Structures are given as structure tokens and as C-alpha cells.
């Protein structure tokens, strides 16, 4: 975008979306999802409210019974000066103990990973949707593309008839 800042978009259920990761559904079979809170600094929250974040390179890891979000880029706040944060720092996720225990069992299985799907505000609190995913093979991706193209062609044919 030229010279304009991207604004967050509001949802009907009071959810203000900041960043999405559509490539995650392309690269992974999504098995299960969770909603988690984030531990953020003040300038990170201000930067998120202006819609300046990217979760495309993000992933979550488990360490010492806690879940951490890595690779998520939250652009430094313009007026933050010396209080600004590191854009790609590791951020702690807030999950229930039972949820973390389920994640530990799932992630230890072969080929499963935790990927962020969406970063948003719900009732003024920053949240992230985490998904447990199994990596797709290249033939799976091709099949998905074929299905999508076929559905698109059918929708076009139906709209021409009507």
C-alpha cells in the first residue's frame, strides 16, 4: 500500500481481526484449534490496534510446560521511542493447564505442529487462534487446488444460468 496504514477490520461478533494466516490452511491439515491470550507490552498493543502485524512466519513451541509464539512480527510503534519492543521477539501464550497438557501429547506425535491462524482483539483483549496441523504433501495441495477450481467453475456456470 502506498503511504496508507492498514487498519484492522471488525467482525460481527465483536472480534477485531488484526492479522490472518491463509497459507496455514494451504500448507497444513488443520486437526484442532484453540484460542489463546498473549502476553504483550504496551507498545505492542498500540501497534496491533493500528493493524501492523504479520503472522505468516509464526509458529508455537512448548517449553517447560508453557507455550510460546515465535516468528510473529509486530511492527514497532511509531511514537514508542525508547519503550519500543523487538518486532520478532518470543511471546508467551496464555492457555489453560489442561489445554497445555493436551498440546504436549499432540505435538510429540510425528509431524504435528502448532501454527497461528489469526491474531485479533476480542472485547479489547489480544487473542490468537492456534491450530494443531499436520503438514500436507504436494499431491494433497494439488488436490485442494483442483477441488477449489472445480467449485469455482461450477459457481460460475450456475451464475450464468440464473
Image: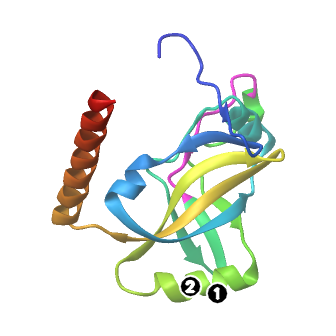
Q: Where does the magenta region start and end?
A: 70-80
| Residue 118 x, y percent position in the rendering | 57, 50
What mark, if any, has residue 104 been given in the picture? 2
Q: Is residue 67 magenta?
A: no
- Rendered image quadrant of residue 113: bottom left
Q: Taking 12 as reference, is 32 above or below it?
A: below
- Disc 1 + disc 2, Cβ < 8 Å: yes
- Crowd tier of the residue under label 2, counting other residues whose Cα lies within 10 Å: few below 14, some 14–19, many 20 or above: some
Q: Residue at x 57, y 81 (%)?
A: 103
CA gap, disc 1 and disc 2: 5 Å
What mark, if any, has residue 41 been given in the picture? none
Locate the C terminus and report the quarter of the image it occupies. top left
* SS category of the residue bearing label 1: helix
* SS category of the residue bearing label 2: helix
Question: Viewer-proximal residue, 150 or 19?
Answer: 150
Question: Viewer-proximal residue, 10 or 62?
Answer: 10
Q: Residue at x 53, y 58 (%)?
A: 116
Amino acid at each position: 500500500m502506498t503511504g496508507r496504514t492498514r487498519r484492522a477490520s471488525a467482525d460481527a461478533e465483536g472480534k477485531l481481526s488484526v492479522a490472518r494466516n491463509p497459507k496455514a490452511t494451504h500448507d497444513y491439515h488443520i486437526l484442532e484449534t484453540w484460542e489463546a491470550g498473549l502476553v504483550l507490552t504496551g507498545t505492542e498493543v498500540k501497534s496491533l490496534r493500528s493493524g501492523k502485524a504479520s503472522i505468516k512466519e509464526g509458529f508455537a513451541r512448548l517449553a517447560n510446560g508453557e507455550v510460546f509464539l515465535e516468528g510473529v512480527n509486530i511492527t514497532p510503534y511509531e511514537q514508542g521511542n525508547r519503550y519500543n519492543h523487538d518486532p520478532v521477539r518470543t511471546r508467551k501464550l496464555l492457555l489453560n493447564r489442561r489445554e497445555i497438557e493436551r498440546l504436549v501429547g499432540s505435538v510429540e506425535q510425528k509431524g504435528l505442529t502448532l501454527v497461528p491462524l489469526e491474531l485479533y482483539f476480542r472485547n479489547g483483549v489480544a487473542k490468537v487462534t492456534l491450530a494443531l496441523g499436520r503438514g500436507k504433501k504436494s499431491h494433497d495441495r494439488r488436490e485442494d487446488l483442483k477441488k477449489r477450481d472445480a467449485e469455482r467453475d461450477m459457481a460460475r456456470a450456475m451464475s450464468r444460468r440464473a
